[in-house]
Amino acid sequence: MITEVSGDILLSSANAIVHGIAPFDHFNQGLALALRERWPSLYKDFRHYCTNFHPKCGELWSWGGPEQVRIISLFTQDPPLSEHQKPGKARIENVHQCLRALKKEVEKEKYKSIAIPRLACGVGGLSWDEVKPTIQRDLAELNAEVHVYGQYVAQKEAAISA
């Protein structure tokens, strides 16, 4: 079941928080930065993962942190061309591929709920009008609650959007 909510995704009680990034992302803007600030070891482990496994667009990386927090990073954006450049923009094909991988991950791990932002619409540069139906289509048959954070409200727990 997919429900659009408003609130602060970092306050979610879902089994996993999902977000979009680029391979070798710097985690220095948007939701990635907020995650890095809250769980600094997330970024350290992410850099180690990228160095050893060289992830590609359309894949995902799952991280488990303190207090049983799970963060699922979807590689929706093109990687930066060099260490000193910003990541590229997201592509809807990457979002679609990531959502299929996310569905498999949620089923494999038996998550009962996930929290997902306006995926790839902030730093990623895609339109919510394009991404929202992709999320609805790709995750419609998922046997878990999907809380889509359509509107960010700082320090506020999720409330169903009208």
Image (spheres, rainbow, N blue to C red):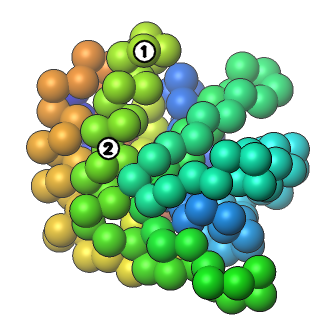
Query: Is 36 displayed left or right of 9 in the figure?
Result: right
Q: Which mark is residue 108?
A: 1
Q: Which mark is residue 99?
A: 2
Query: Is 99 displayed left or right of 152 in the figure?
Result: left
Residue under the image location 45 percent in, 59 percent down: 57
The three-letter code of the residue at mark 1 reads Lys
User: Is 11 drawn above or below residue 151 in the view shown?
Assistant: above
User: Is 106 drawn above or below residue 22 in the view shown?
Assistant: above
Work out whether residue 8 can be spotted.
Answer: no
Are the residues at dot 2 and dot 1 in contact (C-beta closer than 8 Å)? no
Comes first in the chain, label 2 or label 1: 2
Residue under the image location 22 percent in, 36 percent down: 139
Query: Is 71 displayed left or right of 90 in the figure?
Result: right
Q: Which mark is residue 145?
A: none
Residue under the image location 77 percent in, 30 percent down: 65
Q: Quadrant of residue 117?
A: bottom left
User: Is 39 drawn above or below residue 111 in the view shown?
Assistant: below
Residue placed furthest toward the bottom? 85
Question: Within 10 angstroms of label 2, few (less than 14), some, or many (20 or more) residues?
Answer: many
Question: Within 10 angstroms of label 1, few (less than 14), some, or many (20 or more) residues?
Answer: few
The three-letter code of the residue at mark 2 reads Leu
Residue 48 spot, x, y in % from top left:
82, 48
